[in-house]
Image (cartoon, rainbow, N blue to C red):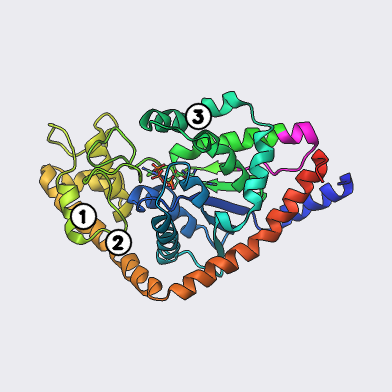
Amino acid sequence: MGNCQINKRNIEHKIMKKRVLSGIQPTGSIHIGNYLGAMKHWVASQDKFDNIFCIVDLHSITVPQETGELRKKTRELAGLLLAIGIDPELSVVFVQSHVKEHTELTWILNCVTPLGWLQRMTQYKDKSARHEIISTGLLDYPVLMAADILIYESDYVPVGEDQKQHVELARDIAQRFNSMYGDVFVIPEPVIPRVGARIMGLDDPTCKMSKSETGQGHALYLLDSPDEIRMKIKRATTDSHRDILFNESRPGINNLLTIYELFSGKSRSEIEAHFQGKGYGVLKEELAELVIEGLKPLQERYREITADPAYLESMLKKGADKVRPIAEGVLRRVKDRIGLG
Ligand code: ATP
Ligand code: LTN
């Protein structure tokens, strides 16, 4: 591509709305950590940006999945994204495996990514320690994520704290490619919320709430019933102190208070004043009712939306058809630069 074309593209890029891209795995069930750390923010900024949300089923298969289950969870997640307020008029929702260019770009990016960069990733180190057989895909997971981001010339990537390192890696890969072959990729920026970027497990507040953790009392799922929510919060691990204060060195109570803060919209000082002189039992009861009420509208919308599976199917197809030309264009430029084809 000539310099003139690059400049034209960069100028067009600047005058259009900035692009937001994020991804979420259709594995397990969506929990309030996913919601408070990432999905809620996608909804809040929808009208300001050009948004693409990707259901990353190819990331899910980095650990073994059951065939029927993966397909079911993919549709369930699409329904949940609409239920929390993602508007298909403002945002594209699609399934990663429906746009094959992601995997082709992954291979190319693999060839410019030093192995050491992947071996250093915290999530890889944690997950590989937990599985007996580790797929090559688990190691390569961040390169596929970099391809998801770079193939749409994304400006912003809103994620929870645990994914910051992967977005930074995507930046490094983009910069390395650009310096080897000339500017092709837009350099993306991670966007991490100030509060809620790392919601902790209820059973063990020293570990982040995670989809792949299967313990009964670990996570609050968006589709949990009121009784499940009450029971899990009641059993949540706290400590032997009495006062109810935000304090990072007391992870159990700090986590419950952070969830309270985000569901109530109240300030920290208001919350501490409200609970002054009260016990942990009161906090847990009030928090459970707050979460139940907070999730109710989205659970109702979810039931309405999923009553029409054909609608969801057509939305996902339209989504993929809309973004595919962008992916094809970027991949063509990349291949051109390298001399492929
Ligand atoms: P797993 O732990 O099995 O890898 P996950 O729960 O992290 O899965 P993802 O689909 O990988 O789920 O993450 C989707 C989004 O939710 C990402 O932006 C991630 O950073 C965010 N997220 C995940 N867990 C939390 C959490 N505990 N607190 C805040 N944000 C989170
Ligand atoms: N690895 C991410 C999911 C993900 C993603 C992305 C997030 C895949 N591709 C692109 C942002 C942008 C995770 O949350 N585990």
Q: Is residue 49 visible?
A: no
Instruction: Kindly identify which residue carries mark 3.
Output: 121
Q: Nearer the viewer, residue 59 or 249?
A: 59
**Residue at the image point whose x is 53% and y is 34% from the top:** 136
Expressed as whole percent of the image width and height from the top left, the position of residue 65 reads 41, 48
Examine the rendered structure and indicate whether residue 320 appears above or below residue 163. below
Mark 3 neighbour density, 10 Å: few (under 14) some (14–19) many (20 or more)? some
Expressed as whole percent of the image width and height from the top left, the position of residue 139 reads 52, 33
Instruction: Kindly identify which residue carries mark 2.
Output: 295
The amino acid on which the numbered mark 1 sits, given as a three-letter code, is Ile
Examine the rendered structure and indicate whether residue 86 appears above or below residue 115. below
**Residue at the image point whose x is 58% and y is 27% from the top:** 117
The boundaries of the magenta stretch are: 177-188
In the image, the residue with mark 2 has its CB under 8 Å from the nearest atom of ligand 1: no
Label pair 1/3, CB-CB below 8 angstroms: no
Expressed as whole percent of the image width and height from the top left, the position of residue 30 reads 36, 53
Mark 2 neighbour density, 10 Å: few (under 14) some (14–19) many (20 or more)? some
Q: Quadrant of residue 113?
A: top right
Instruction: Kindly identify which residue carries mark 1.
Output: 229
